[in-house]
Amino acid sequence: MKPGIRVIRGPDWCLGEQDGGPGYLGTVVNIYPNNSVLVKWDIGTETICRAGLDGAFDLRVYDNAPIGTHQNGWCCDGEYSKKDGGGTIRGFRWKCLVCKYTDVCTECYMSDKKVYRQQCADTKHPFVRYMTPRSLVVRVPPRKRSKKIPLYGIFPGAVVTKVASSSSENDLLGIVQELIDLPPDAYRSAVKVWVQKERDEGETHFPIYRIGADGKVELKLITPANNGTVYIDHLPVLDLTMPVDIEFNVGDRVRVDLNLDTYKHLVSESGGWISDLEKVLGVEVWRA
């Protein structure tokens, strides 16, 4: 975990409206040794938030793509991928446990969009979430039974101003045109902004500002943009006390900690299910 991830208020949030309100995004800009973080919210405020400190979790992770997370060749089967030309999922991967070989990115999952290869917009289908290719597999409940809230922040259409380093920059306004990647692998970590350079001449230009790249935030909101909705309880809490990636070595003792339906579905896509595998559920075994 490192600065640059995009976050939203979590289950133990107790700082009032300092984030802008429910559904507003911010960016982690510093991580402290005591399991807390400094967040710069899109509205321009800053708060120190607990990420495991005293057992409390003030934040949920909305997007870890700005710090370079991608899913090692797993492609999104949703409408967003089709619009964007396809490619490896950046950020979280969401796998349907009913439809075989169906994986979507966060934008498609949260928007309930239909996939173009299979019909998997059914909000009654359960999914599992992968934060990274090597993270724990977490089963989430069907979206149909889950709480959905509007999502606000620095998205296309938002009116923004540059975070001022001098009083002369306070009136620099622009409109966000698109989220972009910055090389080498800071995905969705910056925005291109329409700015009217000289009002009298009507000249415009499109500077690029960071909102996560290198752990930096260079803009703040004047008027937020709504970017659809989010199933808030399906997002993981930001927890600095636990590793995100799990490393296995020969000789490790492991335990399959999934229910039978989830385990059977995942194994069937990775070599096939055999009935003897049911015997290892919940049992600690040696990893050969």
Image (cartoon, rainbow, N blue to C red):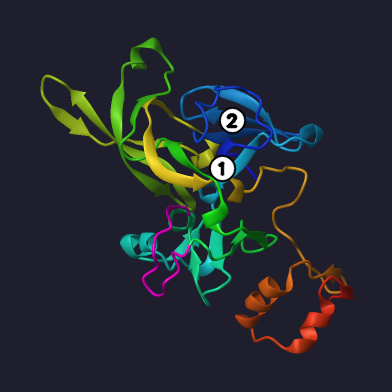
- Mark before the other along the chain sequence, 2 or 1: 1
- Side of 235 relative to 74 (left or right): right
Q: Quadrant of residue 250?
A: bottom right
Can residue 34 be seen in the rendering of this structure? no
With respect to residue 169, does 270 lie above or below?
A: below
Q: Residue furthest top?
A: 167
**Which residue position holds label 2?**
39
Q: Quadrant of residue 59?
A: top right
Could you tell me how far apart the alpha carbons at marks 2 and 1 are, in whole angstroms?
A: 10 Å
Q: Residue at x 54, y 66 (%)?
A: 125
| Residue 20 percent coordinates (x, y) | 50, 26
Which secondary structure is most common in the magenta stretch? loop
Look at the image and say whether residue 21 sits in the magenta stretch.
no
- Disc number at residue 112? none
Q: Residue at x 77, y 33 (%)?
A: 53
With respect to residue 168, does 148 lie above or below?
A: below
Q: Quadrant of residue 246?
A: bottom right
Region of the chain picked out in magenta, as a range: 110-122
The secondary element bearing badge 1 is classed as: loop
| Residue 126 percent coordinates (x, y) | 58, 64
- Side of 142 relative to 156 (left or right): right
Q: Amino acid at mark 2?
A: Val
**Which residue position holds label 1?**
5
| Residue 81 percent coordinates (x, y) | 38, 63
